Image (cartoon, helix red, strand yellow):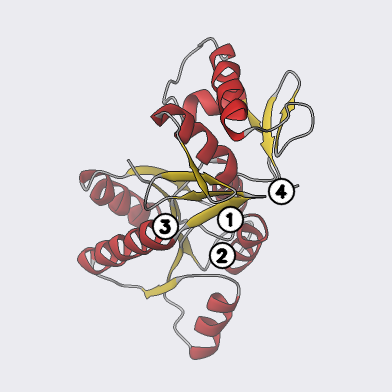
Amino acid sequence: MSKILIIEDEIGISNFLTQGLEEEGYDIVVANNGLTGLELALNSGADLILLDWMLPKMPGIEVCKKIREKNKIVPILFLTARDTIQETIEGLKEGANDYIKKPFSFEELLERIKIHFRNSASEEILTLGNIKIDLAKHEVLCDGKIVSFTQREYELFTYLVKNKGRVCTRTEIIEKVWNIYFEYDTGVIDVFMNSIRKKLNINKDNDCVKTIRGVGYIANDI
């Protein structure tokens, strides 16, 4: 299930979008100000972001800029009543993928969301050093050779690479990858990580996915 983050301070609009998109099968997360939206954008694992331009606490354009400093991939769609050419250009320069003027039809928004998901699925390749993840083909390649992962190994490794440069806690991984929202033995993650390291032939003490003792894991290019 794809996750969409809605950053919108008008409660009526966010409720309307939440209901409509949930009915279409999307997992929805909502923030009603820029600061909370930025935090969720960086930590919720959202697959697409709907971002209002005018927001309390931090304007949408600043939120977009800060997201792009950490995440170059997630599609960002501005939802705004502001429609001057200069503002459109500014938004695109800061990394927005699309720009939808209020008021808009839900059908148009839905089609644009689907287009961005199709584009992401067909074009997106994640990299981590000499390792590549082809999301369209659901393949992990190391030095150009396909590595055979189980579904859970693939989901875990892909989550870490999507969040490259940020420590992912074991509890977070259980919630986001395992989709379990209660106390669970997070030690199972270590078992999967050992298998992933073995298949990728990477060293546990000095590799592209480091263990942060007592916390979780972080993926970094080396």
Q: Are marks 2 and 1 in contact (CB under 8 Å)?
A: yes
CA separation in Å, label 3 and label 4:
40 Å
**Secondary structure beneath disc 1?**
helix
Q: Are marks 4 and 1 in contact (CB under 8 Å)?
A: no
Q: Residue at x 64, y 32 (%)?
A: 201
The residue tagged 3 is: 10
Give, as a three-letter code, the residue at label 3: Glu
Q: Residue at x 54, y 84 (%)?
A: 89
First in sequence: mark 3 vs mark 2: 3
Q: Nearer the viewer, residue 85 or 199?
A: 199
The residue tagged 4 is: 221
CA separation in Å, label 4 and label 2:
30 Å
| Quadrant of the drawing holding the N terminus | top left
- Tell me where residue 101 appears, x and y as whole percent: 37, 76
Mark in front: 4 vs 2: 4
Give, as a three-letter code, the residue at label 2: Gly
Mark in front: 3 vs 2: 2
The residue tagged 2 is: 60
CA separation in Å, label 4 and label 1:
30 Å
Mark in front: 3 vs 4: 4
CA separation in Å, label 3 and label 2:
13 Å
Q: Is residue 200 left or right of residue 123?
A: right
